[in-house]
Image (cartoon, grey):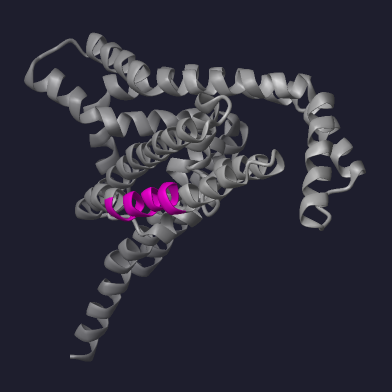
Amino acid sequence: MNNNVIDQNRVRQVFFIILILLTGIVLSWQLYSFIPALLGAITLYVLLHKAMLYLTEKKKWNKNGTAALLMFLSFIVILLPVGLLVNMLSSQVSYAIQHSNELADALRKLVADTESRFGFAIASDENITKLGNFLAGSLPGILGATFNTLTTIFFMYFILYFMLVNARSMEDALYEYIPLKDENVAKLGKEVNSMVASNAIGIPLIAFAQGLVGLVGYLILGVDQPLFWFGVTSIAAMIPVVGAALAYVPLAIIFFANGQNWQGITMLIFGFGIIGTIDNVLRFSLLKKLGNVHPLTTVFGVIVGLNLFGFIGLIFGPLLISLFMLLLRIYSSEFVTKQREASRIMEN
């Protein structure tokens, strides 16, 4: 009789698990375009929730006003500088796309000069023409991406508002509904906080530091539009493996093509020796201090995150890998350890 009851309970449990999974899959599929907004809201919530709880519970501030104030400050401190940087770069990129034919002619001349100087083929005339046509056709995509970014920011703050206002009740609900021990739920929350702080604060700081160091070198070497290349360096520095080399290597090539050999050599030395060193030093010190993140976790996580979520994947890609490893440890703590203890009891 007892076995029959247990079996019925297990059947009902499996049925509800399947139902929950199917419902979650359908909702995720239909709301996939809003995932970046949700992830962005989670990121800002992790950074702001302690201040929210302190001001509303200790200082007794109004929840709605406090949430609005914190959201406004996050916009000023985080999103406004990023927006200005992206706007500066997009204006340059839009100009380049609209004048793609002239750029193709200039690139064709650059390649011809380089080939005659160094004696090896770089690119055919046909491929350069295709590149110009590709750039010309990319403008609608860039405009669409801008619109999508604005939409994502709107929904991100819309979600963040309700997360902040209901911060305490939401955190209590997580402890109640996540089917894990309280200590493992706390461990999960600590890991999320650590990873988000490491990536949301650490990666942009490293990229900005590389951009500033690069800007000094660009000004000394007389690079045209140094502020533009500062923006390119800062954004490229967040891309794994190649990083800021996407900025200073093309600059060196341009110097060589214009016959400015010593500037080109200096640019390469400065880029790999100084800008690259700044990246390595800060990545192994700052990120480790903020979240004790292994560099391989960051590199592979960023690659995965960019493919899945776009720009916000810089933060949540490494978080996914860390959470995967953490879930394996929690599974071992929740089930494997219990099974081993049960086996020892049976043996005794």
Q: Which residues are magenta?
A: 273-285
Count of numbered badges drawn on the protein: 0
Q: Nearer the viewer, residue 52 or 30?
A: 52
Residue 71 at x, y percent in the picture = 32, 17
Q: Is residue 234 left or right of residue 170?
A: right
- Within the image, what quadrant is residue 343 found in? bottom left
Q: Looking at the image, which residue is at 48% across and 42% down?
A: 238
Q: Residue furthest left?
A: 58
For residue 159, say whether it is visible.
no
Q: Nearer the viewer, residue 245 or 73?
A: 245
Q: Looking at the image, which residue is at 25% across and 43% down?
A: 175
317 drawn magenta = no
Q: Is residue 116 left or right of residue 187?
A: right
Residue 73 at x, y percent in the picture = 30, 16
Q: Looking at the image, which residue is at 19% across and 54% down?
A: 183
Q: Residue furthest right?
A: 126
Q: Is residue 331 left or right of residue 130?
A: left
Residue 235 at x, y percent in the picture = 51, 36
Q: Looking at the image, which residue is at 79% across and 36% down?
A: 107
Vertical order, 54 against 17 (above or below)? above
Q: Quadrant of the C terminus?
A: bottom left
